[in-house]
Structures are given as structure tokens and as C-alpha cells.
Image (spheres, helix red, strand yellow):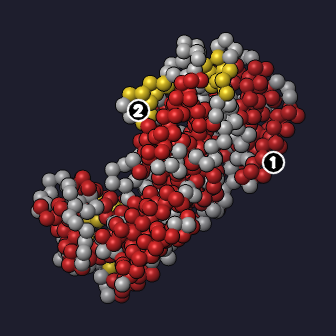
Amino acid sequence: MKERGRWRLRADGRQLDGADGEARRLDRRTAALVAYLALEGATTRSRLCGLLYPEANEVTARNNLAQLLRRFERLGGAYVAQGDTVRLGDIVTVEATPDLLSGVDVGDLPDLEDWLLARRERARDERKASLALDASRHEEQGDLDAAVRTARALMALDPLSEEAARRLMRLLYLVGQVSDALRTYTDLETTLRNELRTRPLPETRQLALDIERGVTAAPPLETRSRRIPRAVLHPPVLVGRDEALTAMNEAWAHGQGVILTGEPGVGKTRLIQEFLATHGGGAHFQGRPGDATLLYGTHARTFRQVLRDFPNLHLEPWTRSELARILPELGEAPPPIRGEQEKLRFWQAKTEVMRAAIDAGLSAMVFDDCQFMDLASIEAGHFIFAALGWGDSNAKYRTVHAFRRGSLLPPVQAALDHAVAIGQVALVELAPLRDEDVARLAAQLELPRGERDVTRLVKASGGNPLFVLEAARSLHEVGTDVSESVPLTPVVSAVIGERLARLSPPALLAARAAAVLQSDFDADLIADVLGAPVLHVAAAWEELEAAQVLAGERFAHDLVFETITASMPSTVGRLLHRGAARALETRAAPAPGRVARHWQEGGDVKRAAPWLFTAGEAAAHALRPFEAGAWFDAAREAFEHLGDEAGARRAAEAHARVSA
């Protein structure tokens, strides 16, 4: 036993190498234990048991861990146990590399496998960043041969990176290796086609064309995407919506609510912002992606916002208690709802809160993206505003409800159609912009080639304002040198996809984690999902906001979220969903339906099953039999898949009870 020796864990994890040449073979769990403690620091025994012995019960897992620690100590390692935590002694060194524990099979240890994949990816990103800095330094110092060698290493590490390919192409051109530069491009083109079914970005194609023509001088070093003007995020002048504004103003003058609908990207939210501004402002509430799986998820966000905007509202004790059902920060919630009268009392509490806010000055309310709202919130909302005189000209408030055309659940659409038919609300449908209005919009966006870009946007946009803004962002990111070659496809998601491809790897990964979470995320939660330092995520977050992918703690547009989701590799998606489930489980009072969905999407049926059942219980306790039945049915299917007859029977019985 080498008590004072120095040991280094091999990258493949198969053995410890001593400073004097001695080697000690390791079994897979010992290797994993050493790597985890070395890189993550002090860890609780319960966490280590979950990583290394996921199938064992708590007692067995702790006994196994104790034996594992003793074996490690006999090998010459050292650890320190302090209460329930364990940390590694300082005589073992482990380097986080892209091939960490490459010789260790952890396929049957799902949490450990997820951690390992995330650690490898982080190490790969750090290595790529280091190589990029080295290549830039060599180039600045005039050592182009060293720059080429470093750029080749970077390309080998990330063969899908167009930024790495462009760097290598430029450097090869500068040292006179034109054929190698063009071969780099054709190799990239083939790889992107085979792996991602896409083609290189316009700036990459343009660089290859310039090299082939011999017109490339000494291009500047690669830089991060150019600044996008503020006007692209929020064009100063609203165009082409005078008729819609007139219709909305007339509706409010007659006491009617407004129903605003249109195709995705047609400009509903921008119109709402302008409309509210002309009426002195108001509250802008939103449905978010993922709300449908959260019982009263939309209302939890809505009423939290109301209480934040009106902190001095006087709430009766019973009202505060009822609201605690969806806002735990208000105190202890009452027992589960057992009948219709108790459900109506809960809804009446919401009504009283909204009434108090209206009396305190909340006179204009917008409910945006209604297509994402959960059914429980929608039904409760209908009750609230019916009680508050919705559509009455004497009411002290006015509303706008906005959603994508054709996206509502049939019963919700039927209720709105009835409200329109009886004159309670006015329907305003947004059409695409006329060509002259597209030109007026584009002229505000400080486009790189001025009128030439305006003309291109008018021809390509189909009158969709979001397309114009996304295309403008793309033109600004590539700059004046290649903007003429940027393809302006009329499919908005394709333009968004081109912009996403220009993000740095850490920023793209953070965006994917946010898309998996769907809503109600922040940098801390994303860091937990990724298992990354929060400061690293903060840097990626800054890049995403600068690129106008995120706007605060939400996506700049739901089509951005949908494009990221649609283009996400399935393996990455499953890994991120499992990370999201684990991160949410550590939060106070996590929404069971949200956790269940992540375990399902992550492919872990065993962990999803109990959460599905818990989600059913939560819905049943809120007297939501439809949602409860759906959750219990999903739980039954999960238990059956696992061969858990008792669990399946319990879920089936619960389903029968709520359906009776």
C-alpha cells in the first residue's frame, strides 16, 4: 500500500498509475468513484449509492459502497469521510478529458452515464476553446504552420463545426495549400449532409468560392456574431396594423374583450404591446410551452405576477390559504379538494385576488399564447371573468386574448366562438403584411446592404413579420461581406436554424437545455441540468440574449423554441431530459407532471412511473378528473411496461375511482 505516493487515473479508467511506474488495476465502479469524487468534490453517500448501485435498496447500496471504499483504500487510494459525505484524498489526480473513463462500461448505471456524458462534453468544449485560442495566438504571431496544426486538431475534435472549418480553410489558403483548403470544405459538406442532412452556412460556401477564385486576401480572424441592432428586437414603428388597432379600440370602447388570432409570426405580440402602450400600459400574461402538463401551471405564473405587480393587495386569510394551493410561498395549503363546492371556493379566491387587483388599478390585461395554457387554468379563468362582468361596458377592466389560429382545444374554441356570437368579445384576425408594409418594416432594421436587402426581404417574406426580423438578424450576423449570398427561404424555421448554427457550442447546448425545460427556467436551473458551473452558463446566456434567442427567462419567440426542439439530436434530447428531471427533483415542491414528462422523454420509464402516479393524485386532489384519469392511465402503461403488476393494478384502480 502506497500511503504517501502520487497516483493518476488513466483516461480509460482501467488503472491507477503511480509516480514510480507502479500500476493498480481498477474495477469499473472504483474507477467511477475515483473520477466522480476527484471532479465533483465532497459528495453524500446517498448520491454515490444512486450513481453506483441504482437497482439496490438503501441498506444494500450503502453496504456495497462501504466495501468499495475499503477496496479503494487497499489499492493505495485515500478518502476522507465526514458524516454522510465522502471526499477524495489529495494523492489521486484525475484529468477531465473528452475520453474520460472511455474503457469503462456504465450503460447499466444511468445517472452515472449521464454525468459522464456531460463531463466529456464539457471537457470537449474546454479543449475546443483552448485550441481556438492557441490557433489565434499562433496566427497573430505569424507562426502559420503552428496555427494550421492547431486548427487541424480543432477540426478533428469537432468535425461538424463550420467555424473550425472556416478557420482551417483560411489558414491553409494563407500558407498556399489551396487544394487542402478546398478539400476541407468538401469534407465538411459531406459530413454535414450525412450527419445532419444540411449544407454549410452561406459564409462557409462564400469562403470556399473565394478561395477557388483566388480572390481571398488575408481574411480577419474569426469573431463572434456581429452586434444585432436594437431595432431588430423591437422595431420602433408598428406598420400595417392600423385596421386591427381600430377594431381593438372600438371593441374596448363598447366594453368587449378582444380575441386576437393569426398565423405564427404574424405579429400578434408586437401589436399587443403597441395597443397596451396606447392605453397606458397593463399586465401581459402568457401561456408557455409545457404548461399543458402542469395543473394550474398558467395560473400559478399569472397570480404570482399579479401579486408581484400589486404587493400591497389586502388578502383575506381564507383567500391567501386557497391561493397557496398553487403558490406554496403563501403558506400551508388547505387539504385536497373533495367536492365541487371546495373547487368553487378555490376559484372564488382567485376571483377575489383579481377583483382586488382591478380595484387597485389593473384595468388592461392581455393573455398571450393561449394555445399553451393548461385546461384547468382556462376553465378557472372563464369562471373568474364571468364573475367580474367580462364583456360588460361598465366593467372596470378590458382584456385581450391572443393565440395561433386553429391551435386551441375544441371545447375552448367552442366557448370563444360562443362569446363572439353573443357579442361578448370581438374577433380580430391578423393577415400577412402587404409588400409596402414589409418594405417599411425592413427599412427600420439598419440592414447591411440597405435598399438591396429591403428588396430581397419584400420578395421572400410572404408578409410574415417574424420572417423579416429573423432574416434581418441573419443578415446582420454574417455582415456586409456575404449578406448577398444568404438564402432567404420563406420558411421562418429554416432562417432561425441558420442563425442557431452560428452559436458557440456552449450557447447552443444551453439553448437546448432551455428548450427541454420549455418554460420557467433560469441560469441556475440550466446549470443544474447541464451539470455545469453557473458562470459558464451565464456566459452562454449572455450570448443567447445578444443573438436574440432568449429574452430574459424565456425564448424570444415560441418558433425559436420549436426550431431548437425540432433540430435537437435525439441522444442529446434524452440526456437533457434526464438532467432536467434530476434538477427539478431537487427543487421544492416540483410539479409531478413536469418531472414525469422529463423522465419519459429521457427514456427512463422506471423513474417516470411513480411520478406519473403522483401527477394523477395531484389532479385528483384538485378535483380534475379528466387530467387525473390521463395521468393514472399513463402510469398504468408505465408499470405494465416494467412488469410491475401491483403498480399497474393500483394505477388502474385509481383511474376507475376518478372516472366513476
Q: Between disc 1 and disc 2, whose residue precedes?
A: 2
The quadrant of the image that shows the N terminus is top right
Q: Is residue 232 left or right of residue 395?
A: right
Q: Which residue is mark 2?
A: 85
Front residue (pair 603, 84): 84
241 is higher (above) or lower (below) than 110: below
Q: Secondary structure at mark 2?
A: strand
Give the amino acid type for the residue marked by disc 1 in the picture: Thr
- Residue denoted by label 1: 190
Which percent across, then down, holds residue 559? 53, 60
- In front: label 1 or label 2: 2
Q: Using the rendered image of the protein, determine whether residue 373 is visible from the camera's viewpoint.
A: no
- The structure residue drawn at horizontal position 29% and vertical position 65%, both measured from the top left corner, is 365
Residue at position x 46%, y 73% in the image: 649
Q: Position of residue 453 (x, y in %)?
A: 63, 51
Q: Residue furthest bottom?
A: 422
- SS class, disc 1: helix
Residue 320 placement: quadrant: bottom left
Q: Residue at x 54, y 42 (%)?
A: 52
Q: CA distance from mark 1 to mark 2?
A: 50 Å
Depth check, front residue: 372 or 247: 372
Packing grade of label 2 (10 A; few <14, some 14-19, many >=20) is some
Q: Residues within 10 Å of mark 1 (few under 14, many from 20)?
A: some
